[in-house]
Amino acid sequence: MPTEAVQILSTVARELGISEDDLLKQGLRSFLERQLREVKAQIFEISGRYGVSSTARRKFNSGLSCQRTPHVGPFERFGHGFVEILNKG
């Protein structure tokens, strides 16, 4: 990590009264959760555009868990990967 980033991390962690490690974990988790919300919104918009039933959408969303399913495409794996990372942390 560049020196400037380390200094900023140290300063913010000190000001918030948490460890640098916790700050990094919380920041990464927040970032990944936001990305996952965006992916889910895109999936919802695309599925609505192409007339995917709400049942199929629910089935897909319920599949966003720690389970890795081989039949999903790269866009879906993107969402699954975020959930796996968030569930580990």
Image (spheres, rainbow, N blue to C red):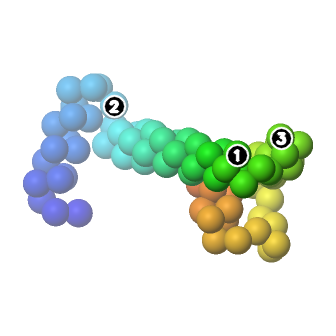
Whether residue 50 is visible, yes or no, is yes
Q: Is residue 31 left or right of residue 88?
A: left
Question: Disc 3 marks which amino acid?
Answer: Ser
Q: Mark 1 sits on what residue?
A: 48
Q: Is residue 64 left or right of residue 30?
A: right
Can you give x and y, in whole percent of width and height, for residue 21 in the image? 37, 46
Q: Earlier in the sequence, mark 3 or mark 2?
A: 2
Identify the mark at residue 54; answer none if there is no mark.
3
Residue at screen point 20% across, 26% down: 15
Give the SS element for disc 3.
helix
Q: CA distance from mark 3 to mark 1?
A: 9 Å
Q: Mark 2 sits on what residue?
A: 18
Residue at screen point 67% across, 50% down: 49
Q: Is residue 9 left or right of residue 78?
A: left
Q: Residues within 10 Å of mark 2 (few under 14, many from 20)?
A: few
Residue 11: quadrant of the picture: top left
Residue at screen point 16% across, 63% down: 2
Whether residue 87 is visible, yes or no, is no
Can you give x and y, in whole percent of width and height, for residue 86 in the image? 60, 47
Q: Earlier in the sequence, mark 1 or mark 2?
A: 2
